[in-house]
Image: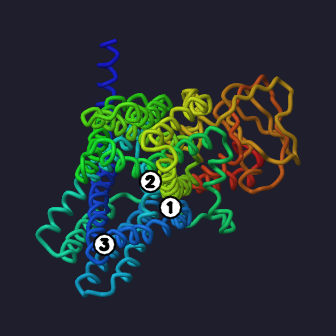
C-alpha cells in the first residue's frame, strides 16, 4: 500500500513538473492568477462603493445588475470561443474586463451617477462570461497529455481558491488607505498584467471562423445538445447544477448558522466562509497528490458531492463552533474535488468543437441555480426552521449521487484503448489534435468485426460512421479497379464531410477488425481544428482525383 502511494506521488509530481515546464500553460496559469485577484478585488471594491451610495439595498441591486444579464448572455458569449481562436477570445475578454474596470475607476473619480457605474459593472461581468468558457476550452489545447490536463485543472482550481482570499484581502487593505476610484485604477493595472501574459500564449490551431456556417440559434444550442444528447453527460451536468443550487442555498444558510445557531455575530459569517476556503486549499493538495489517476475521476467527483452535503447534515444535528469550522472545511475539500474532477471529465468527453459552448451552458446554469438556491433556502428556513433547512439541503447531493452513480461511472469506466489511440494519432486528420481530444475520440470509438466477403456499407447509403482498420483488409469497390485498404488505413470520411451518400461499396477482403467513429464526433473533431480540416481537404482531393490513391471516395 505504501509503495503504491509513493509511486502515485512520484507520477503526480512528474505530471505537475511537466505542466510547470509547459511555457503556454505557465503563462495561462499566471494570467489566471492576475484575473482572479482582479475580479475578486473589483467585486469587493464595487460592493464598498455601492454600500456608501445606498446601503445594503444598493449592494443587492449592483449584484442583480451584474449577474442577471450574465446568466442569459453566457451561452452567446461562449459561442465566440468555439468560432474563433480561444487564446484570442480570452485575450480580448481580459482586455475588455480591464477597460471596464478602468472606465469604472474614471466614472467613480468623476463622481458620475451611481446607476451609470452599476451599468458599467454589468459590462465587465459580461466580458467575464466570455473569459471563463474560453479558458476552460483552451486548457485541453495547451496540455500535452491527459495527466498534464488534470494537473492544469488542479492548479487553476487552487488559483481560484487562493484568489478568493487574496483578491478581497488586497481590496480591503487598499480601500482602507485610498479612495475607491484610486483602488479601481490599481485593479486595472492587475488586468493589464494578465493581458500581457495572455498575449504571449501561442494561438491555438483553430480556424478563426468555422468553414461551415450554421444558423445562429443552432450554434447557440449546440452546447445544450452536446450535453443532453448523451445520458452520462446530461447526468454530470444535472449533478453540477444541483451542486450550485445547494451552493446558493448555503450562501443563505451559512448566515443563519453563524447568527442563529452558533451566535458568532456578523464576523462569524466571514470566519465560516474562510473555513470553506481553507478546505478548498486542502482539497487542492489532495488532488495534487492524485494527479496521475486521471483515468478514474468519477469516484473523486462522487466523493466531492458527498462532502458537499454531509457537513450540512451534521450541522443540523450538532452545532458547536469548532465542529462547524471542521465540517465546513470538509465541504471546501468537496468543492475542489467537484470542480477539478467535473471540469476534467467534461473536457475529456465533450467534442472540442462545442467545448466552450458546453462551459457556457454551465456558466448560465451556475448563475441561475445559485439564485434559485438562495430563494429556496429562504423558503426552507421559513417552513422547516434552520436545522430542517440544513438537513434538506445537505441530503440532496448525496442522494442524487447515489441514484445516478451508474451513469456517472460510465464517464471513465473504460480506460482508453492504447491501440485505438495509436491509430487515431497515425491518421493525418487526427494527428494535429490535442491529446485530450484524441482521448475523447478514442472513448467514442466502437469495435467492429466483419467476416470475409461481408459488406461494411453499400454505395448510395447515407454516411453515418468513419472507420479505422486495425486488422485485415477491405476492398473499396468503385467504377474502376477496386482499391485495397489494410491495417492503419481509414475510409468513410467523404460522405460525412461532404454530406453526400456513400460513393463506393466497401467489402471485407479478409476477416476485419476495425474501429467506427460516429459521424457527429468525427465531423466536430475535424472541422474544429485548422490543421485537421486542411489534412481532410487534402485526403479528399487525393481520393477524388486518383483511382490508385490510398483509398477512394466513400
Of residues 380 and 138, the one drawn nearer to the viewer in this rendering: 380
Query: Is residue 45 depicted above or below 3 in this figure?
Result: below
Of residues 269 and 162, the one drawn nearer to the viewer in this rendering: 269
Cβ–Cβ below 8 Å for labels 1 and 2? Answer: yes
Cβ–Cβ below 8 Å for labels 3 and 1? Answer: no
Residue beneath the point at 37% across and 83% down = 116
Residue carrying label 2: 138
Report the coloring of the rendering: rainbow
Query: Is residue 342 depicted above or below 449 in this figure?
Result: below
The residues bearing labels 3 and 1 have C-alpha atoms spaced at a distance of 38 Å
Residue 356 appears in view? no
Crowd around label 2: few <14 · some 14–19 · many ≥20 (10 Å): many
- Counting from the top left corner in percent of width and height, residue 114 is at 33, 82
Residue carrying label 3: 55
Crowd around label 1: few <14 · some 14–19 · many ≥20 (10 Å): many
- Counting from the top left corner in percent of width and height, residue 530 is at 54, 58
- Nearest to the eye among marks 3 and 1: give it: 3
- SS class, disc 2: helix
- SS class, disc 3: helix
Image-based side of 517 in relation to 435, left or right: right
- Nearest to the eye among marks 2 and 3: give it: 3
Of residues 50 and 436, the one drawn nearer to the viewer in this rendering: 50
Residue carrying label 1: 81
First reached walking from the N terminus: tag 2 or tag 3: 3
Image quarter hosting the N terminus? top left
The residues bearing labels 2 and 3 have C-alpha atoms spaced at a distance of 40 Å
- Counting from the top left corner in percent of width and height, residue 275 is at 27, 41
First reached walking from the N terminus: tag 3 or tag 1: 3
Determine the image quadrant of residue 390. Answer: top left
Residue beneath the point at 69% across and 68% down = 215
Amino acid at each position: 500500500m505504501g509503495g503504491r502511494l509513493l509511486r502515485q506521488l512520484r507520477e503526480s509530481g512528474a505530471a505537475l513538473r511537466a505542466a510547470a515546464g509547459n511555457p503556454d500553460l505557465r503563462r495561462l496559469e499566471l494570467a489566471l492568477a492576475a484575473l482572479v485577484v482582479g475580479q475578486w478585488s473589483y467585486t469587493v471594491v464595487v460592493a464598498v462603493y455601492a454600500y456608501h451610495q445606498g446601503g445594503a439595498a444598493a449592494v443587492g441591486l449592483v449584484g442583480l445588475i451584474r449577474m442577471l444579464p450574465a446568466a442569459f448572455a453566457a451561452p452567446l458569449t461562449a459561442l465566440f470561443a468555439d468560432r474563433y481562436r480561444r487564446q484570442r477570445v480570452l485575450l480580448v475578454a481580459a482586455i475588455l474586463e480591464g477597460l471596464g474596470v478602468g472606465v469604472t475607476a474614471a466614472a467613480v473619480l468623476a463622481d458620475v451617477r451611481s446607476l451609470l457605474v452599476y451599468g458599467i459593472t454589468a459590462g465587465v461581468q459580461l466580458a467575464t462570461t466570455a473569459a471563463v468558457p474560453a479558458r476552460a476550452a483552451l486548457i485541453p489545447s495547451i496540455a500535452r497529455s491527459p495527466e498534464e490536463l488534470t494537473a492544469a485543472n488542479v492548479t487553476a482550481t487552487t488559483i481560484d481558491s487562493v484568489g478568493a482570499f487574496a483578491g478581497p484581502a488586497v481590496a480591503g487593505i487598499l480601500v482602507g488607505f485610498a479612495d475607491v476610484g484610486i483602488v479601481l485604477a490599481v485593479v486595472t493595472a492587475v488586468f493589464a498584467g494578465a493581458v500581457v501574459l495572455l498575449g504571449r500564449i501561442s494561438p491555438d490551431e483553430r480556424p478563426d471562423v468555422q468553414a461551415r456556417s450554421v444558423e445562429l440559434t443552432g450554434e447557440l444550442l449546440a452546447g445544450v445538445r452536446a450535453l443532453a444528447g448523451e445520458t452520462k453527460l446530461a447526468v454530470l451536468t444535472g449533478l453540477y447544477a444541483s451542486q450550485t443550487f445547494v451552493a446558493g442555498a448555503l450562501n443563505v444558510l451559512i448566515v443563519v448558522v453563524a447568527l442563529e445557531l452558533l451566535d458568532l455575530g456578523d464576523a462569524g459569517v466571514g470566519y465560516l466562509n474562510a473555513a470553506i476556503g481553507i478546505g478548498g486549499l486542502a482539497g487542492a493538495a489532495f488532488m495534487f497528490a492524485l494527479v496521475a489517476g486521471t483515468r478514474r475521476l468519477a469516484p473523486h467527483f462522487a466523493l466531492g458531492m458527498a462532502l458537499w452535503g454531509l457537513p450540512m447534515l451534521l450541522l443540523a444535528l450538532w452545532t458547536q463552533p469548532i465542529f462547524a469550522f471542521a465540517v465546513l472545511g470538509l465541504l471546501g475539500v468537496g468543492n475542489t474535488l467537484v470542480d477539478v474532477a467535473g471540469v476534467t471529465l467534461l473536457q475529456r468527453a465533450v467534442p472540442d468543437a462545442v467545448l466552450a459552448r458546453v462551459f457556457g451552458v454551465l456558466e448560465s446554469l451556475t448563475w441561475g441555480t445559485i439564485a434559485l438556491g438562495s430563494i429556496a433556502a429562504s423558503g426552507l428556513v421559513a417552513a422547516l426552521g434552520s436545522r430542517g433547512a440544513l438537513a434538506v439541503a445537505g441530503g440532496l447531493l448525496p442522494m442524487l449521487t447515489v441514484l445516478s452513480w451508474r451513469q456517472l461511472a460510465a464517464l471513465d469506466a473504460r480506460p482508453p484503448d492504447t491501440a485505438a489511440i495509436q491509430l487515431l494519432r497515425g491518421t493525418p486528420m487526427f494527428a494535429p489534435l490535442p491529446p485530450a481530444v484524441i482521448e475523447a475520440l478514442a472513448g467514442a470509438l466502437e469495435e467492429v468485426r466483419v467476416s470475409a466477403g461481408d459488406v461494411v456499407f453499400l454505395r448510395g447509403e447515407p454516411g453515418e460512421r468513419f472507420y479505422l482498420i486495425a486488422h485485415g483488409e477491405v476492398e473499396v469497390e468503385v467504377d474502376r479497379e477496386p482499391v485495397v485498404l489494410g491495417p492503419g488505413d481509414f475510409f468513410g470520411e467523404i460522405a460525412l464531410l461532404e454530406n453526400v451518400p456513400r460513393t463506393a461499396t466497401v467489402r471485407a477482403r479478409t476477416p476485419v477488425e476495425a474501429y467506427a467513429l460516429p459521424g457527429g464526433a468525427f465531423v466536430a473533431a475535424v472541422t474544429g481544428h485548422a490543421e485537421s480540416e486542411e489534412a481532410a481537404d487534402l485526403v479528399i482531393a487525393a481520393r477524388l482525383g486518383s483511382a490508385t490513391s490510398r483509398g477512394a471516395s466513400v
